Image: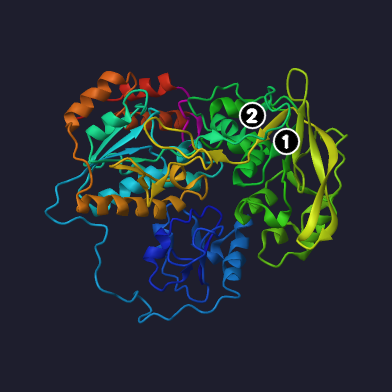
Amino acid sequence: MTYAITQTCCNDATCIAVCPVNCIHPTPDEPDFGTTDMLYIDPKSCIDCGACADACPVDAIFPADRLTGRLREYEAINAAYYADRAPEPALASPMFHPWGEPAFSRSLPADFAPLRIAVVGTGPAGMYAAEDLLLHTNAEVTLIDRLPVAGGLVRYGVAPDHPATKGAGETFARFHAHPRVRLRLGVEVGRDVTPEELAAHHDAVIYAVGAPADRRLGIPGEELPGSVPATTVVSWYNAHPETGADAVDLSAGRVVVVGNGNVALDVARILVTDPDTLAATDIADHALAALRGARVREVVLLGRRGPEHAAYTASELLALKHLPGVDLVVDDRDPRTGEAIDAAAPGDKAALLRDVTREPVDWTADPARDRRRIVLRFHSAPVEARGTERVEAVRVTEGRSAAGTENGPENVVESGPEIAAGLLVRAIGYRGVRLTGLPFDEATGTVPHEGGRVKGLPGGYVVGWVKRGPSGGIGANRACAEETVGTLLADAVAGTLPPPTGTPQAFQKLVRRRSRGLVDARGLAAIDRAERARGRDAGRPRVKLATVPELVAAARGGRWFRQA
C-alpha cells in the first residue's frame, strides 16, 4: 500500500523534508520544482510510513486504498508522474536519508544579539518568513497587517469549499502567540506609520504585501456596472471587510469569466455550486444569501489559448468534472479545441477533457433553468462589454488558423458571437501596487530586489508576490521566504543592517497613538473565538465577521489588553 498526494497539495515541500526514502518529487533542488501542478509520491518507493501525511499542512495526503469519490483518480495521477522517469538513486538505508556534514547556514552566531524584524503582511509569504526567523534564529518579530485580522490570502483568497487548503492558516496561527512575536494588526504602512518610522524601530523590515490589484482587459464597456475583477468576487464570498455585501450582482442567468487559471475556476465553481453545500463552509453570510437567491445557471470560461495551454491545474479541473448537479461542457465550435484534446498525451491537462461533453454552444439560447453548467470556451477573448446601464452581453472573438508561414501558423481572429450575460468577471491575473517609500517597477508590478533585498533601501526586504510577481500558490512562498531570510541574515552577519534608533516600547506607543483599530494577539484570539462561536450556532466551522468595526469590537470584547 502506498500514499498519494491529492487536490489540495500546496507544494511547500514539508512532506519532502520528512520522507525517509526520498519518494516525493519534485524536490526543491530539482529543476521542475515549482512548475508542476503538485508534488507526487512514487508508489514503487513509498514504504507506507505515513510521515508525509502527518506533516502535510493542508491534509492532502492519504493512503491510496482509502481514496474515495473523485480523489480515487489521484492514485493514477501520482503514479503517472513516474512513468517515464529514471529511478531515483537508492539511499544508504531504507529508513534514513544519508547524512552529510552538519550545516547551519540559516543560523546566526551564538553571541549575536537578537534582531528586531518587522514583517508587513500576515499572508503565507509573510508567515513563512516569520516562521523561518523564529525557528532558526533568536529574532524578535513584529507582525503587521493593515486589516485587524491576520491571514491574508489564506483567509480571503482561498475558496470556502477548500477547507483543507485553509488549514494552512492553522499552521501559521500557532506563531501568532509565539513569545518572540508581537502582533500589530489594523496598522497600515503609509497611513498609520511611514516606512521610515518602521525602519527606525527595527533592524530590518520584510514587506510581504502581495499583489492586490487586478489586471485590466482594455476593452470598451469594461467600466460598466456588472464588470468586476475576480479579486472582488473572491473577497466578496470570503467576507473581506473592504468588499461590500452588494458588490456582486447575481440577478442574470449567465456569467462570463475571462481567464482559465485556478482563480477563474474557483469563481465559476462557487457561482454554480449548490448553496446547501456551501452552507457547511465559512463562506460569507451575505454571499450565501445571495447565492440562494441567484438566477445564475451558466458560467462561461473564456480562454484566449487552447486547452493544451490552460493555466489551471489538473486538480482544479478534476474538481469541476465531479461537481454534483453541474454539467461541464466544452464549446468545440473552433476545431482546434477538439483536435488538441484528442491529441493530448496521457497525463496532460487537455487529456482530462476527453470524456467531457463537447458541443457547439448556441449563445442565442437562454441557459436552462433546471440545470447548472460550466462551459469552457477556448481560443476566444472578449472584445466588448455591451449594455446601457450595466453589462448585458459580451462580444467575443472566434479564432481561425490561416495559412502557415515559415515562422509557424498565423492566427487570424474573426468576430465571434455575442454572449448574453449580466456579469463579466475578469480573472486574468493580479498585479502589485506601489508602496510609499519603496522603489517600484511599473512594468512588472514588483519591487526591484536582489535575492529579496530591496534595491536602494538598506534594511528593506521583500517576499512573495510583491517580490516575484503573482505566480505560485501557498507553498511557493516557502522557498521564496527562505531566500529572502537568507539574504537578510547574511547582511546581518556582514554588519550592513542600519541599527534601529527606536525601542519596541516606543513603537508600541506610536502605533497605539496612530491606529484606532489596533488588534494584538489576545484580540486576534478573541476574534477567532467569536467567529467559531457564531459558526457553532449555525452548524458551520465559523461565521466570519465581515466589517472592520465588527472585527475590532470582537477583539476588544475578548480580554482586550495592552500587550507589553
Q: Please state which amino acid type lies under the numbered disc 1.
A: Val
SS for dot 2: strand
Q: Are marks 1 and 2 in contact (CB under 8 Å)?
A: no
Q: Please state which amino acid type lies under the numbered disc 2.
A: Val
In the rendered structure, the answer to whether residue 149 lies left or right of residue 416 reads left
Residue identifier under label 2: 228
**Rendered location of residue 520, percent (x, y):** 29, 30
Nearer to us in this view, 535 or 240: 240
Residue 477 in magenta stretch: no
The vertical placement of 7 against 416, above or below, is: below
Q: Tag 2: Cα neighbours inside 10 Å, few (<14), some, or many (≥20)?
A: many
In the rendered structure, the answer to whether residue 449 lies left or right of residue 245 reads left
Residue identifier under label 1: 256
Residue 77's quadrant in the figure?
bottom right
The vertical placement of 310 against 513, above or below, is: below
In the rendered structure, the answer to whether residue 191 lies left or right of residue 318 reads left
**Rendered location of residue 296, percent (x, y):** 73, 31
SS for dot 1: strand
Numbered circle sitting on residue 337: none
Residue 58 visible in rendering: no
Residue 543 in magenta stretch: yes
- Report the magenta residues as a range: 538-547
**Rendered location of residue 405, percent (x, y):** 81, 60
Mark 1 and mark 2 lie on one chain; the one further toward the N terminus is: 2
Nearer to us in this view, 306 or 77: 306
Nearer to us in this view, 140 or 383: 383
Q: Tag 1: Cα neighbours inside 10 Å, few (<14), some, or many (≥20)?
A: many
Magenta stretch: helix, strand or loop mostly:
loop
Q: Marks 1 and 2, Cα distance to the nearest angstrom?
A: 11 Å
In the rendered structure, the answer to whether residue 45 lies left or right of residue 186 reads right
**Rendered location of residue 461, percent (x, y):** 34, 44
